[in-house]
Amino acid sequence: MKKIETIIKPFKLDDVIDSLTELGIEGVTISEIRGFGRQKGRTEIYKGAEYIVDFIPKLKIEIVIADSLVDSAIEAIRQSARTGKVGDGKIFVSPIEQAIRIRTGETDEAAL
C-alpha cells in the first residue's frame, strides 16, 4: 500500500477527483493549506494599496491505495492537475505499513 499526497491549485480539485473516481479510488481526504514554492508570493491590490501575499492557497489531497493502482493514480493526478504554469503542485508517494478500519477491524487492503 502507498499513500499519495498531492498539492494542487484549488480550481483543479474537481478535475483531479473526477480522474481518481474513474480509476475506482473512493477514499480521499482534502485539506485547505497555504504555502509557496518557486513562485514565492504574489502581489495584489486592495483598495488601491499594493500588498504581498506570502502564502498561496492550495489544496492537499491524500489517498491510500493498493500498490497496483499507484502508477495509474499518479498519472491521472499529473494529467488532471497540470496547467503548465509555475505552482501546479507536487505529488509525494510514501509506503504504508498497515491500515485498519476501526468499525470492522479489517486490515491492510481490505480496510481501504
Image (cartoon, rainbow, N blue to C red):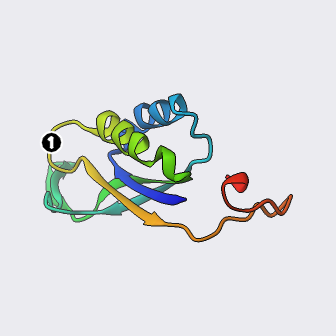
Residue 76, quarter of the rendered image: top left
**Quadrant placement of the N terminus:** bottom right
User: Is 60 above or below relative to 94?
Assistant: above
**Place of residue 65 in the rendered image (x, y in percent of width and height, measured from the top left):** 55, 51
The residue positioned 49% from the left and 44% from the top of the image is: 69
The residue positioned 67% from the left and 52% from the top of the image is: 112
**Place of residue 17 in the rendered image (x, y in percent of width and height, measured from the top left):** 49, 36
**Place of residue 105 in the rendered image (x, y in percent of width and height, measured from the top left):** 83, 63
**For the residue carrying disc 1, how many other residues have a C-alpha within 10 Å: few (<14), some (14-19), or many (20+)?**
few
Is 29 displayed left or right of 55 in the figure?
A: right
Residue 80, quarter of the rendered image: top left
Find the residue positioned furthest to the front: 68
Find the residue positioned furthest to the right: 104
Label 1 secondary element:
loop
Residue 102, quarter of the rendered image: bottom right
**Place of residue 34 in the rendered image (x, y in percent of width and height, measured from the top left):** 35, 61
The residue singled out by tag 1 in the image is 85
The residue positioned 40% from the left and 60% from the top of the image is: 93
The residue positioned 48% from the left and 67% from the top of the image is: 95
Q: Callout 1, which amino acid?
A: Lys
Is 55 displayed left or right of 5 in the figure?
A: left
Q: In this view of the protein, which residue sits in the foreground, 23 or 10?
A: 23
Is 90 displayed left or right of 16 in the figure?
A: left
Q: In this view of the protein, which residue sits in the foreground, 84 or 108?
A: 108
